[in-house]
Amino acid sequence: MAQRKSATKTEARERARRAAAESMAREQRLLELGEEFFVAQGESEQIMEAAEQRIAELRAKAEHEAARAKEDQGRVVAGMRGERVTVPEIAQRLELSVAEVRGLLKNSAAATYEDDADGGSISANGEQPTVEAPEPEPAHVDA
C-alpha cells in the first residue's frame, strides 16, 4: 500500500527540520568558535602592547643608567687630568683611544658647566669640590 500524501509530507517536513536544526547547531558552534578566536586575538594584541611598553620603559631606564655611568667615566678621566696626567697617558692607562679620552673630557666639562649653572657640582663624597686658581706666571722682565 502506498503512503498517503500527508504522511509523505510530514516525513519530508521532519527531514527538513532535522537538516535545519543541524545547520543551525553548526552555525552556532561556528559563531562560538569565531568569538573565541577574536577574544584570543584581542588578548594577544594586549599582551604584545604591554610587552612593548615594558621594553620601552626598560630601554629608557637602561639608557639613563648608561648615561650616568658614562658621566662617571668622564669624572674619572677628568680626575686623572686634574692630576696632570697627559691625555695620551690616560688613554694608555684606560685602554682607550686619545679621541675617546678627549670626548670623555669634553662631555665631563659640559656636565660640570651644567652642574655649575644649576648651583654647583657635588663630588662623589658629597662635598662641594674646591677649585684652585692657576698660579700666576712670573712677570717676564727684559733686561
Image: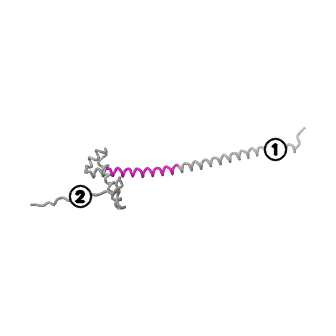
What label does residue 134 carry, if any?
Answer: 2
**Is residue 68 covered in magenta?**
yes
At x 36%, y 55%, the residue is 126
User: As shown in the figure, which amino acid type bears the numbered disc 2?
Assistant: Pro
Residue at 23%, 58% in the rendered image: 134
In-front residue for pair 40/124: 124
Q: Position of residue 5 (x, y in %)?
A: 87, 44
Check the picture and name the quadrant holding the N terminus. Answer: top right
Residue at the image position 62 percent from the left and 49 percent from the top: 39
Residues 104 and 119: in front is: 119
Horizontal relation, residue 49 to residue 127: left or right: right
- Extreme residue in the left direction: 143
Binning the other alpha carbons within 10 Å of mark 1 as few (below 14), some (14 to 19) or many (20 upward) gives few
Label pair 1/2, CB-CB below 8 angstroms: no
Q: Residue furthest right?
A: 1
> Which picture quadrant has residue 119?
bottom left
In front of the other: label 1 or label 2? 2
Element type at mark 1:
helix
Q: Residue at x 45, y 50 (%)?
A: 59
Magenta region's main secondary structure? helix
Q: Is residue 74 magenta?
A: yes
The vertical placement of 4 against 140, above or below, is above
Within 10 Å of disc 2 (Cα), the crowding (few <14, some 14-19, many 20+) is few
Q: Nearer the viewer, residue 116 or 26?
A: 116
Q: Which residues are magenta?
A: 51-76
Name the residue carrying label 1.
14
Residue 51 point in image, percent of width and height? 52, 49
Label 1 and label 2: CA atoms lie apart by 110 Å
Labels 1 and 2: the sequence-earlier one? 1
Residue 112 marker: none
